[in-house]
Image (cartoon, helix red, strand yellow):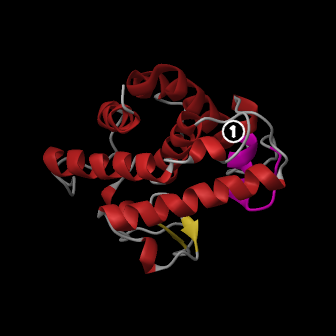
């Protein structure tokens, strides 16, 4: 199956962000279009990912970005994607919750979403190198997620909200998504938060 299609189907099958009854800010069709944008952005930004690091495939990187951003953005919530809701006291933007990314990373169009994912992959690669991570594995991904989440710790067991249990849960989601593709989101439910 095409990677973009697998990412899109996983996004559609995954749990939705919670909104009180009658307060969902987008229709099902609008969300489906946004999920297609996210899938296309990840697919486009991983085009040469097989060259990024030995022991990692394009699919490894794509599902890692999917698992991390799904959790960081409150299950791809539109208000995080479009910039109305920012994390870390307003410092973090886009579905990747990039610190100091500015408005250039904000937006639900393909260009802005690609810029956001470009930064997500840049940060993941920085932490892969900084933390001396080897081949793709749940432990390797948890280590990268710990660095990404804290900006400093390579230890996924560090007693921090970002790098502790959340890094391991997100790595578990990555492993399930990578193993099961489009059906992985059903298996990863509850593992990302």
Q: In this view, does 148 lie to the left or right of 181?
A: right
Q: Which of 32 and 162 is in front in this view?
A: 32
Indicate the secondary structure of the residue bearing disc 1: helix
* Residue at the spot 57% in from the left edge and 33% down from the top edge: 174
Quadrant of the image containing the N terminus: top left
Q: Is the magenta stretch mostly helix, strand or loop?
A: helix
Q: Mark 1 points at which residue?
A: 141
Residue 9 drawn at (x, y percent): 31, 32
Give the total of numbered labels. 1
Q: Is residue 153 within the magenta segment?
A: yes
Residue 13 vertical position relative to residue 42 in the rendered view, above or below = above
Q: Where is residue 75 in the image (x, y as percent from the top left)?
A: 41, 46
Q: How crowded is mark 1: few (under 14 residues within 10 Å), some or many (20 or more)?
A: many
Residue drawn at the location 70% of the way across and 33% of the way down = 136
Which residue occupies the foreground of this view, 163 or 131?
Answer: 131
Q: Which residue is painted at 77% across and 42% down in the image?
A: 156
Q: Residue 148: say if magenta.
A: yes
Horizontal arrangement in the rendering, residue 57 relative to residue 160 (left or right): left
* Residue 189 rendering spot, x and y as whole percentages: 46, 28
**Which one is in front, 29 or 19?**
29
Q: Where is residue 117 in the image (x, y as percent from the top left)?
A: 49, 58
* Quadrant occupied by the C terminus: top right
Quadrant for residue 142, please give it. top right
- Is residue 50 visible in the rendered structure shown here? yes
Q: Start and end of the magenta stretch?
A: 142-155
Kindly identify the residue that appears in the image at 52 percent across and 66 percent down: 87
Q: Is residue 74 visible?
A: no
In the rendered image, the vertical position of residue 56 relative to residue 147, given as above or below: above
Determine the image quadrant of residue 54: top right
Position of residue 85 relative to residue 44, above or below, is: below
């Amino acid at each position: 199956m095409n990677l973009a299609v697998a990412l899109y189907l996983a996004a559609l099958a995954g749990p939705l962000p919670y909104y009180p009854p009658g307060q969902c800010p987008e229709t099902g069709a609008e969300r489906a279009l946004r999920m297609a944008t996210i899938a296309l952005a990840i697919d486009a930004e991983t085009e040469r990912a097989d060259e990024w690091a030995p022991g990692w495939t394009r699919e490894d990187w794509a599902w890692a970005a999917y698992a991390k951003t799904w959790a960081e953005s409150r299950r791809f919530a539109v208000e995080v994607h479009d910039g109305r809701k920012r994390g870390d006291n307003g410092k973090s933007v886009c579905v990747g919750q990039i610190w100091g990314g500015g408005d250039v990373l904000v937006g639900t169009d393909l260009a802005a979403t690609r810029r956001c994912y470009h930064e997500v992959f840049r940060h993941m690669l920085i932490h892969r190198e900084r933390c001396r991570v080897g081949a793709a594995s749940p432990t390797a991904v948890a280590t990268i997620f710990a660095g990404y989440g804290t900006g400093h710790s390579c230890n996924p067991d560090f007693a921090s909200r970002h790098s502790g249990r959340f890094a391991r849960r997100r790595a578990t989601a990555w492993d399930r998504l990578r193993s099961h593709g489009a059906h992985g989101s059903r298996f990863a439910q509850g593992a990302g938060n």
